[in-house]
Image: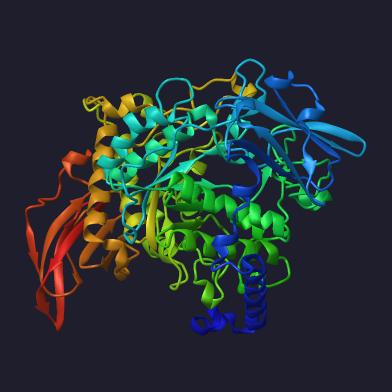
Amino acid sequence: MLYDSDSLLLPYKGIIEERHRLCQEKARMLQGNAPRLADNCNSHLYYGLHLSQEQWLLREWAPNATAIYLLFDGNSWQRNSRYAFKKIDGENWELSLPEEELSHGTLYKLLVEWPGGSGERLPSHTTRAVQDPYTKVFTAQVWQPAPYQWQHPRPEAGAAPLIYEAHIGMATEQQKVSTFVEFRLFVLPRIAQLGYNVLQLMAIQEHPYYGSFGYQVSNFFAVSSRFGTPEELKELIDTAHGLGIRVILDIVHSHSVSNEAEGLSHFDGTDYLYFHSGERGQHPAWNSRCFDYGKGQVLNFLLSNCKYWLEEYQFDGFRFDGVTSMIYYDHGLGKAFTEYSFYYDGNEDTDALTYLTLANQVVHEVYPGALTIAEEMSGMPGLASPIREGGLGFDYKMSMGIPDYWIKLLEDVPDEQWHVGDIYYELTNKRAEEHTISYAESHDQALVGDKTIFFRLTDKEIYTGMSVFDHSLVIDRAMALHKMIRLLTIATAGGGYLNFMGNEWGHPEWIDFPREGNGWSYAHARRMWSLLDDSSLKFKYLNAFDRAMIHFVKQSRLLDYEPHVLVRDIERQLLAFERGGYLFVFSFNPDKAFVNYHFEVAAGKYTYVLCTDNTNFGGQGLINEQTEHFTQYIAQKNLISLYIPPRIGIVLKSEK
């Protein structure tokens, strides 16, 4: 169990064991007589619209409903007893229709009646919802095309995840919503060229408000139609697989949109069907609904949703959003988790912990090679530990403190006071038993009101100083630190690395989706690839460095090993460590170069592999990378002597 490898958890042994027992008990209840838990998670096969034996079957779970009607063109969108559902037990309703009544592309809704009221609803398990371009109203759509023919198998699992986080809609330079087809044709090749082996797609589940970044989901089984068709998403994933890139879904099970017309809120007139009732069912920060993870039907809905995306779309796993919000009654808002007692003080939602554990079990039963990542900021022990040890079973958790640390350093600390000991500690501070995804910045740091690292470093100089024909000390510093920060972040990563689309080459400004406050503009909801493709601008250098860095990390299998620190020279701001047979040397000193700097390393020959100051990456070329360094045995130590210019990151390969 968790406490066997971490004695600080022994005081909470009873709580850890009780949580594990409750989870196993719930798993047995849901599994029933099925061979595996995943075999009994099939709400998507029972509920929703299905064509079976020349008839359409449409089922809904709505215990409080007194009547349900199908509304569509065939009945002029009017309440009609011919299209009334029948209640088949105390909670479920069913409608059967001849095959000719509905066809591929038919639009429809439900009219749900309950004591004292009624409302139009979209089916809970609809796999397609489309928005009218004029009225902006969402409607379910019958989707029954010819089955997609997959061309490529899933890439082999096992390699350390190097994740490219992307949003389909803002992936174009044009001021519009981009599509799956455009992403496949124009962006996916860029990702493959850079060398990333995992593509993380945001905002795939249908959401009414584009500006929510996809985190206010209404239809959990539906692909967002604003980006294209389900088949176009499948072709994108299939093409990525052919390029050796795994694709994971940024899945939102932490809450649901509060909208009633599009979502699940008050589906049958009650506020407690899928969600907690009253105040507990309302998220105080997100104005959304909070799932009741203690209900068997809700668990089956969410677990089936995981299974559906894996099987129907061949996703390779999930990044679970908002885990901190799920697992604490107070959603972890405004709380600093500074000691272990905060994870075992009664503020934890055991039902949510159980759901996440079962989700990991189901996902890995459906696809053993699946990748699951928790977006969690409290640092709860066991999040990325095996279920059998009392953990939640995630493969990785996000190191959310790292980007916050870089921002704090850039904002509050002058360059000459950067403490390399603190930097190394912050980047490597994690539970040794759990794998993490390190990142310097994600989409969160690029949102309006915040700044990306490169824009924070350059500010207004980005508009005038990025020409290859110009020289700017501000731009020199920005480019050097941008490369160093990213190299140091990935070189110390706890198992995986993430980058958000465009940040690798220093995309300017911020992200701001169309909204009333900006005049519904798309100017900041896009990626200006032309800046990268313009050979007269320095953005190309940052992109070239990222490509070299990612390929090096992937080919060396660097993240399969642990880093070991060699030098933390606080006064000179020099940091050196070894990892997987490679020597990493960083100088954060802003103006001093060090000649013949000696320190102890493993005996052997050292050759240059990567240098942030290389002219191909926009550097000054102060290092002769053809030089071979041999250790000298002095005073019973194997010493290497290096020339270390200011603001530089160097990687050397050790050959014994």
Q: Is residue 320 visible?
A: no
Residue 540 rendering spot, x and y as whole percentages: 26, 33
- Seen in the picture, residue 344 relative to 436 is either above or below; the reply is below
Which quadrant is the C terminus positioned in? bottom left
Position of residue 397 measured from the top left corner of the image (x, y, whole percent):
49, 60
Residue name at image x 81 percent, y 25 percent: 79
Q: Residue at x 61, y 26 (%)?
A: 100
Left or right for 191, reference 58: left
Residue at image coords 58%, 36%: 54
- Can you tell which quarter of the image residue 468 is in? top left
Quadrant housing residue 192: top left
Q: Position of residue 358 (x, y in %)?
A: 58, 64
Give above or below for 210 relative to 43: above
Query: Which residue reaches farthest right?
Result: 116
579 up-or-down from 51: above or below: below
In the drawing, does residue 571 fall left or right of residue 468? right
Give the camera-side residue of 233 and 245. Answer: 233
Q: Is residue 256 visible?
A: yes
Tell me if 321 is positioned left or right of 571 in this view.
Answer: right
The colouring scheme, among rainbow, by chain, secondary structure or one colour, is: rainbow
Assign the N terminus to one quadrant of the image.
Answer: bottom right
- The quadrant in which residue 631 appears is bottom left
Q: Position of residue 81 (x, y in %)?
A: 82, 29
